[in-house]
Amino acid sequence: MDYIEKLRESANGCGNILCMGLDPVAEAMPDKYKSNWTLGYFEALFKGMQNKKLIPAAFKPNFGFFFPDGLLVLRELIPLVSQYFPNAPIILDYKAGDVSQTAEMYARGAFCKLGVDAVTVNPFAGEEGLIPFAKYSKLGRGTYVWNLPSNPGAGFVHSREDYLKIASLIEKISSESPGMGAVLGATQSIMGDFESLVDFYSRENVPLLIPGIGAQGGSAERVLEILNSKDYDLRLVRVNSSSGLTHPWYKTGKAPDNWLDCCLSNIRELTKELSIK
């Protein structure tokens, strides 16, 4: 099964296009879970989700939140996700990107050692830095190229012309390696560029990973409105939310006693917002 088929199958199965980001912050964890570096926390959360039949269409652990002390935890967390949600693709938020042999080592580490279904990469080494990842599409893996960042400062090094240049490269590689996709941020200030890129990619079966909703201020409703206006195949899209689902209290105080109910409530609400049935 190729990565495009995996995306469609998981979305059809759970009826939504939610990607649940896993960005663990030790200080945000309930006291009883802080000592075991969040594995116990995520297992309790996953059990609660399974009991309530709350199934996202993908999961996205962020490599930066596990480096360097938590890499062994990451190696345990990935199979834990697969245990509870066997049909959900696991996307490693990697943002790797380098030339030829170095890129190959990054790709091998993610796909062969960690066993994830897809990764995010940056495009700054050009085609040479993307091909080592793209070749894993023959093994059913996906690659999302950072095309439109969701942070406000990205305009310092990018312009609309740059975004379209990256999009053209992604489209070129995806025609030969299905599973090559794009990361498109969806915060309010960049929705004009977002819409232009969605329009560009709507010509092909290009998977989209969309961060920026929730804590970053983006609107799931607006994202869906734009995607539907372009007749995008929603099953190829994953809209990500991280802290708003796993520790929504972090900026306002410590974890409440009913932390699990808080998380499950937010997950339930967003799976409904991002329903495709």
Image (cartoon, rainbow, N blue to C red):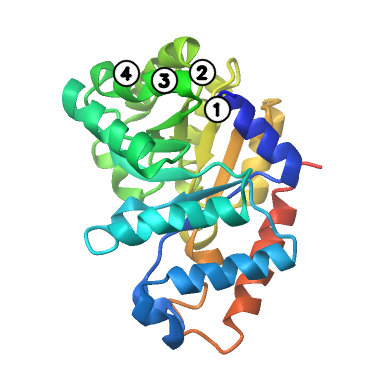
| Quarter of the image that includes the C terminus | top right
Mark 3 sits on what residue? 170
Task: State if disc 3 and disc 1 touch (CB < 8 Å).
Answer: no
The residue positioned 32% from the left and 30% from the top of the image is: 159
Distance of label 3 from label 4 (alpha carbons): 10 Å
Q: On screen, 254 above or below 220?
A: below
The x and y percentages for residue 113 are 33, 41
Distance of label 2 from label 4 (alpha carbons): 12 Å
Distance of label 1 from label 2 (alpha carbons): 7 Å
The x and y percentages for residue 42 are 51, 68
Instruction: Give the amino acid at mark 4.
Output: Ile
The x and y percentages for residue 144 are 43, 32
- Sequence-wise, the earlier of marks 1 and 2 is 1
Mark 2 sits on what residue? 178
Whether residue 247 is visible to the viewer of this picture, yes or no, is no
Depth order, front residue of 150/181: 181
Mark 1 sits on what residue? 3
The residue positioned 71% from the left and 25% from the top of the image is: 231
- Sequence-wise, the earlier of marks 2 and 4 is 4
